[in-house]
Image: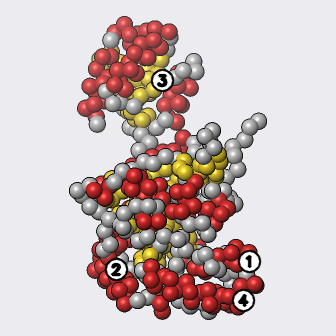
Amino acid sequence: MINIPRGTQDILPEETKKWRYIESKLNELMELYNYQEIRTPIFESTELFARGVGGSTDVVQKEMYTFKDKGDRSITLRPEGTAAVVRSYIENKMQGLPNQPIKLYYTGPMFRYERKQKGRYRQFTQFGVEAIGAENPGIDAEVLAMAMHIYQSFGLKHLKLVINSIGDMHSRKEYNDALVKHFEPVIGDFCSDCQNRLHSNPMRILDCKVDKDKEAIKTAPQISDYLNEASKAYFDEVKQHLDDLGIPYVVDPNLVRGLDYYTHTAFELMMDNPNYDGAITTLCGGGRYNGLLELLDGPNQTGIGFALSIERLLLALNEEEIELDIDNEFDLFVVTMGDAADRYAIKLLNDLRKNGIKADKDYMSRKVKGQMKQADRLNANYTVVIGDQELENKNINIKNMQSGETEMIQLDGIVDYLKNKE
């Protein structure tokens, strides 16, 4: 037997209903915020992610699915969405479009070769937004408010917004220099990954899962001490907007989000529920990237965005025991007796479906009792039983499966009857 690849999952019909509901709701929310959908290829040039995500990151060094195609080109299955969206923005010259900033969102599979954990897969579905072309604290606040709105719209209540500023490029460089100076004397005690990152991206040391409890990390310099006046003013405006919107937040100086392209605002949205013994789960994260477009040979434009895993959103909903408002109703199940009725039912179903009525029949040659059980399993609102007598008389009894009441109608009047019941 051939089994599913490790780190992937089959999403079976009962679960796909939840996925469709979530994706539909996300699309509706994006219309409210005037964000337009973009779809990029599942694979891109490896160079895009090496440059756009950062050569020092775990994503590039350890987690990408990379291969050579038949033209001997290095190709990578996309591990995240931002780099691909920015590539498309540059390639399609979106900076020249009249409506600025360009507000985009995407949903699609991403691929990372990492150890399987609860809510984390090697193929996962990411939803993300990118607002490109405006460096304005107001749009930073809009993006943070949107992230909060998304999770609240699904009924989640125990949410914690954590924010910080990484500052502009100058502030970030000053901070990186301070981290190098701080870690250099003790770097030999750290893991090999941290040793490799010391001079390429020292902020990543602060994210290390292996060395997170080391004293040097606890006493490391904080970015807030290295922000220049312009960066402090920008961050103060973002916080003021959040205060105006009534959105609570926590400033965490250790939140640095070490991807190479982040500047200014960085944030994570977490699930913080005391019923989980204080457990906090990161639901989504993102921030502002003021150097990414130029890094990818694009114009001097800025952007901000975030991404979330739909798998992790579903996990949060399950942990909160939130039931999605999914329409599981089924309009009509047709029970047949005899070959003539069976043939008629196939034509009837075709007419019903063309009129927007959800309908089905038995194809397993079950007895009437078995067909009625099937109608119950489908949560059918109505059933009809068609046999030789009904075909001859042109009349039929339609049964309301909730009340148990029956009503006689003309056989060719089923569509109109159900339409009037909507």
Separation (CA) of disc 2 from disc 3: 58 Å
Which of the marked residues, 4 or 1, is nearer the chain's N terminus? 4
Side of 247 where 292 appears, left or right: right
Q: Is residue 336 above or below residue 297?
A: above
Q: What element carries label 1?
A: loop
Q: Is mark 4 on a helix, strand or loop?
A: helix
Which of the marked residues, 4 or 2, is nearer the chain's N terminus? 4
Can you tell which mark lies on residue 361?
A: 3
Crowd band around label 3 with a 10 angstrom C-alpha radius: few (<14), some (14–19), many (20+):
some
Which residue lies under the disc numbered 2?
Answer: 238
In this view, the residue farthest toward the left is: 98
Can you tell which mark lies on residue 186?
A: 4
Which residue lies under the disc numbered 1?
Answer: 191
Amino acid found under the numbered disc labelled 2 = Val
Q: Nearer the viewer, mark 2 or mark 3?
A: 2
Q: Are marks 2 and 1 in contact (CB under 8 Å)?
A: no
- Give the x, y percent position of residue 354: 34, 25
Crowd band around label 1 with a 10 angstrom C-alpha radius: few (<14), some (14–19), many (20+):
some
Q: Which of marks 3 and 4 is in front?
A: 4
Which of the marked residues, 1 or 3, is nearer the chain's N terminus? 1
What residue is rendered at 57% in x and 89% in y?
178
Q: In which quarter of the image is the C terminus?
A: top left
What residue is rendered at 35% in x and 66% in y?
301
Amino acid found under the numbered disc labelled 4 = Val
Amino acid found under the numbered disc labelled 3 = Lys
Separation (CA) of disc 2 from disc 1: 36 Å
Q: Is residue 309 above or below residue 246?
A: above
Q: Along the line of sight, which residue is nearer the eye, 132 or 142?
A: 132
Side of 242 where 330 appears, left or right: right
